Amino acid sequence: MGKKLFIPISLFILALITSCDEEDKVREISKDGAIETVMNVEHLNDKVDVIRTTYKVWVKNVMVKTYLHTDTIPSLGIAKEQAENNDGDVKVIDLKKDYEFYITVK
């Protein structure tokens, strides 16, 4: 990713982080001049997860470019969690651990 995109993406991420309060959640982004970023992790198998980051570049309400970055990362393994069904029965199940996302903007 070039330096020209780093600053707008960084500014978007900063705006996203500062708007995380329940009252301030963004329901619709301004597409007049924005970069929309979506990150997700998919559990591929017991050893590997896939992280996908998508950037959509919006100019004057038109999506002019989409960047997709995909990579494999190590799986975090299994965690034991309590689960309850509709009848109130509780049992311990195995769930794949999820990554936490932390974004630093400089």
Image (cartoon, rainbow, N blue to C red):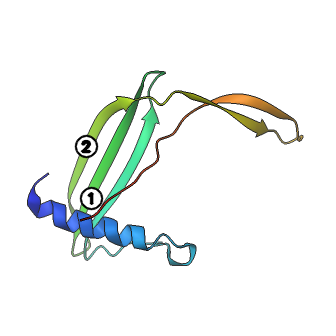
Tag 2: residue type?
Answer: His
* Secondary structure found at label 2: strand
The residue drawn where x is 28% and y is 38% is 70
- Which corner quadrant of the image does residue 89 belong to? top right
Viewer-proximal residue among 65 and 42 = 42
Q: Which residue corresponds to the image point at 81% horizontal and 39% vertical from the top-left?
A: 85
Residue 82, position in %: x, y?
Answer: 75, 36
Q: Nearer the viewer, residue 57 or 3?
A: 3
Residue 55: image location, x then y, percent: 27, 55
Left or right, residue 27 beside residue 63: right
Tally of marks: 2
Callout 1 touching callout 2 (CB < 8 Å): no
How many residues crowd around disc 2 within 10 Å: few (fewer than 14), some, or many (20 or more)?
few
Q: CA distance from mark 1 to mark 2?
A: 12 Å
Left or right: where does residue 48 sit relative to residue 12?
right
What residue does disc 1 label?
56
Quarter that holds the C terminus: bottom left
Label 1: few (<14), some (14–19) or many (≥20) C-alpha neighbours in 10 Å: some
Q: Mark 1 or mark 2: which comes first in sequence?
A: 1
For the point 24% across and 63% down, which residue is it?
Answer: 9
In this picture, residue 82 sits left or right of residue 3: right
Amino acid type, callout 1 = Lys
Which quadrant of the structure image shows residue 47? top left
Residue sitting farthest toward the left: 3
Q: Which mark is residue 69?
A: 2
- Where's residue 3, x and y in %? 10, 59
Please tell me the numbered disc located at residue 33: none
Say which quarter of the image contains residue 37.
bottom left
Q: Residue at x 54, y 35 (%)?
A: 97
23 left or right, relative to 35 = right
Q: Secondary structure at mark 1?
A: strand
Vertically, is 67 above or below 80?
below
